Amino acid sequence: MLAQFIPFFVLFLTAIALGAMLFFAAVVAPITFKVLSAEDAGKHTRAIFPAYYLVLAGLSGVAGANAFFIDSGIGFTLIVVATGFVFAREVMMPRINALRDEAKSGSTVAAQRFGRLHKWSVWLNMVQIAILIAVFWTLAVRV
């Protein structure tokens, strides 16, 4: 019985993570920057991202740990995705915030570095979305 439940559980967690990421990218971020001033939107996103990364690391990590019971490749892939969220939260986000603060103080070097690192964080997020789509599709076809 449990062996039959695990694929659905992993699929469910993957779907939640993927849906949250797509909702944030397609709805939350655009509305935030449309409705709020640039400064308030920045404060808002700084408040959201730690929770965003933590929740998504948890969802993909738990999904990955459970996926090892059905397919070690999927389990490893989801753990890599979870690690990406932890890396973004603990390494990239603090550096991005510090560079943004420096750029606001007039540093053009910081502004360039901020832009580059922000692009890397967006790229990482897009890769994670693509991986979650592939995992979701793989699992959906199986169950």
Image (spheres, rainbow, N blue to C red):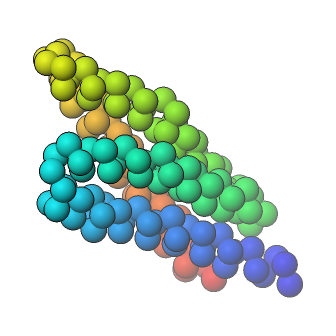
Q: Residue at point 26% right, 29% down? A: 100
Image position of 70 with respect to 126: above or below: below
Left of 10 or right of it: where is 122?
A: left
Determine if residue 74 is in view: no
Give residue 70's quadrant in the image: bottom right
Image position of 127 with respect to 86: above or below: below
Q: Residue at point 14% right, 18% down? A: 106
Q: Residue at point 67% right, 79% down? A: 8
Left of 61 or right of it: where is 101?
A: left
Q: Position of residue 5 (x, y in %)?
A: 76, 80
Q: Position of residue 92 (x, y in %)?
A: 42, 32
Left of 103 or right of it: where is 129?
A: right
The quarter of the rendered structure image containing the C terminus is bottom right
Q: Residue at point 16% right, 62% down? A: 35
Q: Front-most of 119 and 139?
A: 119
Q: Position of residue 102 (x, y in %)?
A: 25, 20
Give residue 23's quadrant in the image: bottom left
Q: Front-most of 32 and 7?
A: 32
The quarter of the rendered structure image containing the N terminus is bottom right
